[in-house]
Image (cartoon, rainbow, N blue to C red):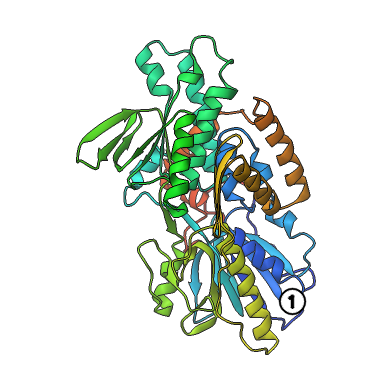
Amino acid sequence: MTTSPAHVPATSDSRPGRPRVVIVGSGFGGLFAARRLEKADVDVTLIGKTSHHLFQPLLYQVATGILSEGEIAPATREVLARQKNARVVLGEVVDVDLAARTVTSTVLGRRTVHPYDELIVAAGAGQSYFGNDQFAEFAPGMKSVDDALELRGRIFGAFELAEIAETQEEVDRLLTFVVVGAGPTGVEMAGQIAELARRTLRRDFRRIDPTGARVVLLDAAPAVLPSFGEKLGDRARRQLNDIGVEVQLGAMVTDVDADGIEVKDADGEVRRISAATKIWAAGVQASPLGRILGEQSGAEVDRAGRISVQPDLTLPGHPEVHVVGDMMALDKLPGVAQVAIQGGRYAADSIRRRLAGKEPQKPFHYLDKGSMATISRFSAVADIGKLKFSGFVAWVIWLVIHLLYLVGFKNRLTTILHWTVSFLGRGRSQRTATQQQVFGRLALENLPPEFEASKTGGPKTAPVGEDVTGRESA
């Protein structure tokens, strides 16, 4: 392997003097902004921390064996392959210089500085453990393909280990699954684990009964799906109970370790749940870039790391910098895909108008297209404007909407096939789990300092073109 410098043109049809648009992030906001600029007379550089665009709402289906990671995470380069004015760059953005109008990214010790004329920051958000980051070792989040694959290994591995366990106490610990967070992600994950145990795996083991698995959904809040309203939240809770999920509300997590989780109830009582598999689906923290931008622009940054933006999604005093998606704080907008998609498109349209000398757009207005969450096979809840659905009708709406927003015909086709296998039959086509999936993240986190560049993408001071990992070329 080598990291010797190579010259790469900005885009396949770039022309000197053409405006340079840099987009940070390959999620919904970044990708939809890039595609909106397809016919614009600009050079687009999209910098992604990963090489794929992640359809995050379906991550839980990767974790529970319904879908493969490729179906919800197409290669960004492939998605934009026909867009001649767009270039895709792999790297983690570690700095933005508003005065110099540059973005610095790094990968494996190589630092690259990208000049820009217009900047769209759509770096998204990661999991928040509310100041208890040590919980992550034992309770992975649900924000990346790595997270989903690790959880798949933990979930299916728990049943395998239970089959060879020597005591009932050990079996009970292995077959107890705790999901923290009763928002859409937590509800969907808990529902699918329950369905996996009671339907998919019920005939596959000889010494244990998978249908006896205990699935616990915890939240410190007093309601399930609080953003959906009391009516739909209550329906979701009843449907979860019907499929065997224990919903425990008003329960605050105080500690997590390898063997279980400690919670404090509303009455102050502290208790422990013995569980091998814990899943964290509570809380998000915006990208650290928010604070970097806030320090330079003077914009306020909230506790979740989101930066306050102008009504046109730009930073104060910097009309050339647009912030969209989970990173922006504006009118208490939710951190959902539609906010990022609409924000990305709005920012792209603003750039096109500025460059064409046209009047600015009206302030950004989010069109709420509704919220939905699946509970189990044939059961979901949907909140669309004044209309509220639950049960089979909501589930069908959920299927259609998610298919529409999957990127690529190939992904839609294979997703339909896997949904057919999983929902009409008992099978799940993605049950492969390896030790690498389970222990890979922990191994990376415990690498010695000399491997820091490989682990994190490289220190800010790494010389351009130098492989600081110390490896020899292959």
- The residue singled out by tag 1 in the image is 40
Residue 327 seen: yes
Between 268 and 299, the residue placed more toward the observer is 268
| Label 1 environment density (alpha carbons within 10 Å; few <14, some 14–19, many ≥20) | some
Element class at badge 1 = loop
Between 423 and 1, the residue placed more toward the observer is 423
Q: What is the x, y in percent for residue 365?
A: 56, 73
Which of the image's four quarters has the C terminus?
A: top right
Between 50 and 64, the residue placed more toward the observer is 64
Q: What is the x, y in percent for residue 340?
A: 57, 63
Q: Is residue 332 above or below residue 191?
A: below
Residue 464 seen: no
Q: Is residue 131 left or right of residue 194?
A: left
Residue 29: name its quadrant: bottom right
Q: What is the x, y in percent for residue 103?
A: 55, 71
Q: What residue is drawn where x is 61% and y is 28%?
A: 431
Q: Is residue 384 above or below residue 261?
A: below
Q: Is residue 269 left or right of residue 213?
A: left
